[in-house]
Amino acid sequence: MRFTSYASGLATAALLGSSLLVHPSYAAAPAAPPAAAPAADKEKPADPASVVATVNGEKITLADVQEAAGSIPPQMRQLPPNVIIPMLVNQLIDQKAILIAAHKDGLDKKPETQKLMTSAADTALQNAWLSQSVMPHLTDADMTKYYEENYANKAPEKEVHARHILLKTEAEAQDVIKKLKAGADFGKLASELSTDKGSAQQNGGDLGWFKKGDMIPAFSDAAFAMKKGDISTTPVKSQYGYHVIQVLDTRTDPVPSLDSVRDKIRQALIQKYVREAVDKAAAQVKVVRFDPTSGKQLPNAPATPAGAAAAPAKK
């Protein structure tokens, strides 16, 4: 789904479009010499319908340039309008020329091209509908509300920085604990013996900082019951094997500021409301699934009348 990039393009076009409107290269010609023109006329924005070029008589307007601004890469957005505008105009001229040549060669009549054109049109329509459904929920007020419900009013969470050695059997784990009590190096034993090769080979079993809900319950319960510097006195069993844990440090994760999590909140809201929009659309159509081999309707997917209410979820 390209909804995020679509919405981003809208924002870029709006920002750059305001600059394009006031650029003197595309402003309407003054009715009188500059010295005689009123100050207000000099600063009057150009009409978006102003023609900036024609290709075989087909017009390219300032509005077309503003729309094209939405696809400008981030590194180009710092360039002044008098550099960007001619580049965009040239790009639009090239695109028109290619389209004219493609129509002349009859490519628009070929089935494979028509299929691609239909797919592109469908994607554009899907994005437009999702934008219409989702964008109203991405206001500052919505993000502030989400922040207050999911961040601001929650108590700070404890975090643990730990490392572990994962063994296949309890006997192996007991042997490692004995070696650690005798002064063996934890990181070295992890590198040599741990079956969790990802953490063992890269950083001696170090798992970094994590919250209680980030790990499986058996591991988290043990780690969060330990203090800084503690090493497991008995192996911790999980579905992966037997863990020997060392807690390197603990801390309380402070409540983040709204600005620091704004992007996360935006993405969470987009996911939430895209899902709701898709579910709403699906609930209003009739869906029948078939077995691709026999062609028979699947018994576990009965037809649903359009507009029928969804069955309530079991509790």
Image: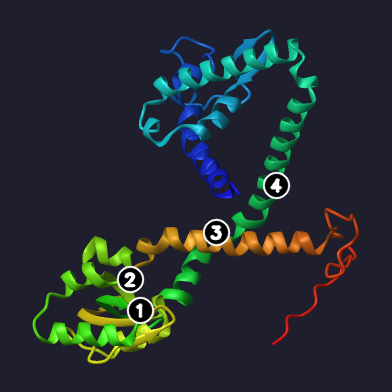
> Which residue position holds label 2?
195
The residue depicted at 40 percent of the width and 83 percent of the height is 238
Sequence-first disc among 2 and 4: 4
The residue depicted at 22 percent of the width and 81 percent of the height is 247
> Which residue position holds label 3?
138
Residue type highlighted by circle 3: Leu
Residue type highlighted by circle 4: Gln
Q: Is residue 188 left or right of residue 22?
A: left
Secondary structure at numbered mark 2:
loop
Q: Residue furthest left?
A: 183
Task: Give the label on residue 77, or none.
Answer: none
Residue 11 in picture, x, y percent from top left? 51, 43
Few, some or many residues within 10 Å of mark 1 (<14, 14–19, 20+): some
Mark 2 → mark 1, Cα distance in angstroms: 7 Å
Mark 2 → mark 4, Cα distance in angstroms: 47 Å
Few, some or many residues within 10 Å of mark 4 (<14, 14–19, 20+): some
Q: Which dot, 1 or 3, sits closer to the camera? A: 1
> Which residue position holds label 1?
168
Q: Quadrant of residue 58?
A: top right
Q: Is residue 141 above or below residue 10?
A: below
The residue depicted at 72 percent of the width and 37 percent of the height is 119
Q: Which dot, 2 or 4, sits closer to the camera? A: 2
Q: Is residue 140 left or right of residue 119?
A: left
Mark 3 → mark 4, Cα distance in angstroms: 18 Å
Q: Nearer the viewer, residue 74 or 84?
A: 74
Q: Are marks 2 and 1 in contact (CB under 8 Å)?
A: yes
The residue depicted at 54 percent of the width and 63 percent of the height is 269
Q: Is residue 305 above or below residue 234?
A: above
